[in-house]
Amino acid sequence: MILYPPAKINLGLHILAKRPDGYHEIETIMAQIPLCDILEITENEHDGFKQTGILVPNDGQPNLCERAVNLLREHRAFPKLQIHLRKQIPVGAGLGGGSADASYTLTGVNTLFDLGLSSAELEDFAAQLGSDCAFFIEGGLQLAKGRGELLSKIEPLGRTVHLVLCNPQIHVSTATAYAGVQPKNSRTALLETFKTDGVNGLQNDFEASVFESFPAIQNLKNKLYAAGATYAAMSGSGSSVFGIFDAAPVLSADLSSQIIYSGLWCY
């Protein structure tokens, strides 16, 4: 079985409060985009995992795909398997690539071995692996609340645009991004703004602190606007930045060298 776990972008992200459990209460609009890893799952005599493509630091810990398999084995019996992950989504870039890989492992194993798990059950398992993993069970366009695991689907606006996604190859840890954030609860909800104005008026609360520490990321956003983007923002806690254009833009060589996806996209 070959699957294509997609990246996501955060069209907007609000950090509302610090929770007693140490997590932050957020609301964010997440959207699936056509940049994918490649995940192959096959039945095998022994469990095995192979990763190629972009290097994923593991610090001696199991990959999220392996953790997904281990979690399922605690609840269901199924044969040994081999996983080959071809990594194409940049790591630590605010695109959710690792989360997508984990969630697609859950759905792939469920389908391959006919485990009979529902989407709701798979989302529960995914949420145990990471805050935004549950999003990738159904993907599309969704509002996420809580720490990112409370999901509700959003009706797309039916707009076709040209999406340019850039990665400056700067690693921003989630801890670093949160360190400079001041939670703010009293403002118009993201979904209300999105339904009224589309992406215009949305914002990512991580930008202020991340841009202060990494001005090159802010510079990248400014360049997208200078190139004609109608909206540009950092995705998640960074460092990737995307721009939405009415038509395919003519970009400078400097900007073009940082593009990891460019093409038509609907939201």
Image (tube, rainbow, N blue to C red):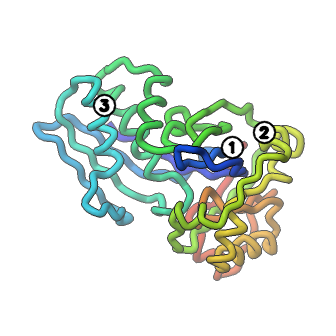
Q: CA distance from mark 3 to mark 1?
A: 28 Å
| Residue for badge 3 | 72
Q: Please state the horizontal and vertical placement of residue 145, each as a whole percent of the image.
A: 65, 38
Quarter of the figure with residue 52 = bottom left
Q: Earlier in the sequence, mark 3 or mark 1?
A: 1
| Secondary-structure class at tag 2 | helix
Residue drawn at 46 percent across, 62 percent down: 91
- Nearest the viewer among 3 and 225 is 225
Q: Looking at the picture, which amino acid does disc 3 mark?
A: Leu
Upstream in the sequence, badge 1 or badge 2? Answer: 1
Front residue of this view, candidates 131 and 118: 131
Question: Mark 3 falls on what kind of element?
Answer: helix
Secondary element under disc 1, as helix, strand or loop, is: strand
Looking at the rendering, which quadrant does residue 234 occupy?
bottom right
How far, Cα to Cα, is label 2 from label 3?
33 Å
Q: On the image, numbered disc 2 is attached to which residue?
A: 191
Q: Residues within 10 Å of mark 1 (few under 14, many from 20)?
A: many
Quarter of the figure with the C terminus: top right
Q: Is residue 225 above or below residue 65?
A: below
What is the residue that sits farthest to the top in this orientation? 116
Which is nearer the eye, 61 or 89? 61
**Is 26 situated above or below 214?**
above
Residue contact at pointers 1 and 2, CB within 8 angstroms:
yes
Circle 2 packing at 10 Å, graded few (<14), some (14-19), many (20+), is: some
Task: Give the percent coordinates (x, y) of residue 201.
Answer: 85, 53
Query: Which residue is the site of mark 1?
Result: 27
Task: Please name which of the two marks, 1 or 2, marks the residue nearer to the observer.
Answer: 1
